[in-house]
Image (cartoon, rainbow, N blue to C red):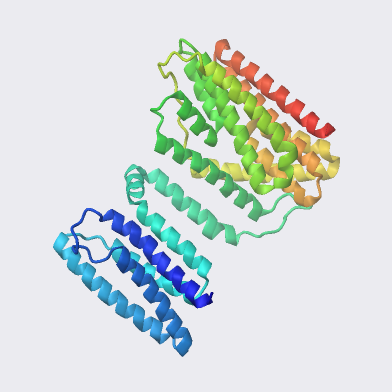
Amino acid sequence: MDPLIARLGLALAIGLLVGLERGWQERDAPDRSRTAGIRTFGISGLLGGVLAALASALGSVSVLVGGFIAFAAIFAWYKAREAAHDEDFSVTSVIAGLGVFALGSLSVAGDYRAAAAGGAALAAILASREILHGLLKRLTWVELRSALILAVMTAIVLPLLPNRTMDPWGGFNPWEVWFLTVLMASISFAGYVAVRLLGTTRGLLVSSLSGAIVSSTAVTMALARNAMSASNPLPLAGAASLAAMVSVLRVCAVVLIIEPSVFSSAGIPAIAAAFAFAICGALLLAHDSGNGEGSAIARNPFELGPLLLFALLFAVVATASAALAAQFGGRGLLGTSALAGTFDVDVSVLSALRLIKHSVPIGTVSQAVLVALAANALGRLSFAVFAGPVRFWLPLAAATLVAATLGICTFLLLGSG
């Protein structure tokens, strides 16, 4: 098939896809009362492709520029008449029409894959009107500020940082520290958004699982405090066990994203432990009386103070881990992972994973990840013992013991295999 024909077909398909969405939104309107529907948008995409082909054949980009200006003027004029009749001030369809024309031109004159992706993204954004508007209504200033902080951290601060190690042991790289800080905050922010979208009114299960994406330790502390006045603490212990499961699975996701080579040796035992937490949590939740006692509210992970503290702690632990690993080998790294993991498993795991680039064996890093998870579980349990009654922390201790046993057995079986 002639490549030009295929590209023109893509230009037409982009227009039809966007036109399908626009037509569905206005499907109840009387015939001939709408300026543009599926056919008009389809032709608009094809027109953009044809003019791009003519501009290329004639060697004159002015053909495409003039055509775009003429199309924009005609399309906007008709939409203005429609808007005046309907008393509608929305300019979305006009922008969508111009976007379809431009993407049709790109599919012929540029990267057709980018054009196809842009067409799909444009249609998806148009179809998400109710979701996006609903989200805006529920968005608070704190959450908007979080999005702005993320944009500044990623687009402004990150490129300015030096991407090289600054210490003799190769542990402190400002760019990597900040990048991984942004990555972890983004993962936690996804959990925070889940809490805001789902709400905590759906009960103990949803609030605990969603909150654990941000901080399982904070969830455990909240549940322990609630258990002090609860008539039946067992469901709260079950929720804490499920929060521990989410924390372990979150670490597995981080390992898989940053260093997939470590996942086979550290991720599988961790998943086994998470499975044990899930079973124990489900059994404990079976004792729920249905009164929905307790909830765990996640805090915004983009609060600037805790975020800077995380980056500072990560930089210190990363440097210390590299120094101890260089001085004492694997034993130094395991000691640092255990100490840091007690307070923040993310810092400990990220610091260990970075050492893969400094010739630390994968097996040693895998052990450091598992040690960090174990230390964090013990840290959570210590907080539970401090803040909660025996009927809360004792079942949680049993679940932790079962999870640790299953994880260790899985690790030993993998090692012997």
Q: Position of residue 16 (x, y in %)?
A: 37, 64
Q: Position of residue 17 (x, y in %)?
A: 39, 61
Image location (x, y in percent) of residue 135: 36, 45
Residue closer to the observer: 405 or 98: 98
Q: Is residue 355 left or right of residue 397?
A: right
- Specify whether residue 383 is in view: no
From what the image shows, is residue 143 above or below residue 240?
A: below
Residue under the point 54% across and 56% down:
154
From the viewer's perspective, tell me whether residue 166 is left or right of residue 296.
right
* Residue closest to the eye, 121 or 203: 121
Extreme residue toward the front, this view: 1
Left or right: residue 71 compared with residue 214: left
Q: Nearer the viewer, residue 200 or 28?
A: 28
| Whether residue 28 is situated above or below residue 52 in the rendered picture | above
Q: Residue drawn at (70%, 50%), measured in percent from left and top?
A: 172
- Residue closest to the eye, 75 or 249: 75
Q: Quadrant of residue 54?
A: bottom left
Q: Position of residue 377 (x, y in %)?
A: 65, 26
Quadrant location of the N terminus in the rendered image: bottom right
* The quarter of the displayed image where residue 295 is located: top left
If the image is split into quadrants, where does the C terminus sit? Answer: top right
The residue that appears at 51% across and 66% down in the rendered structure is 114
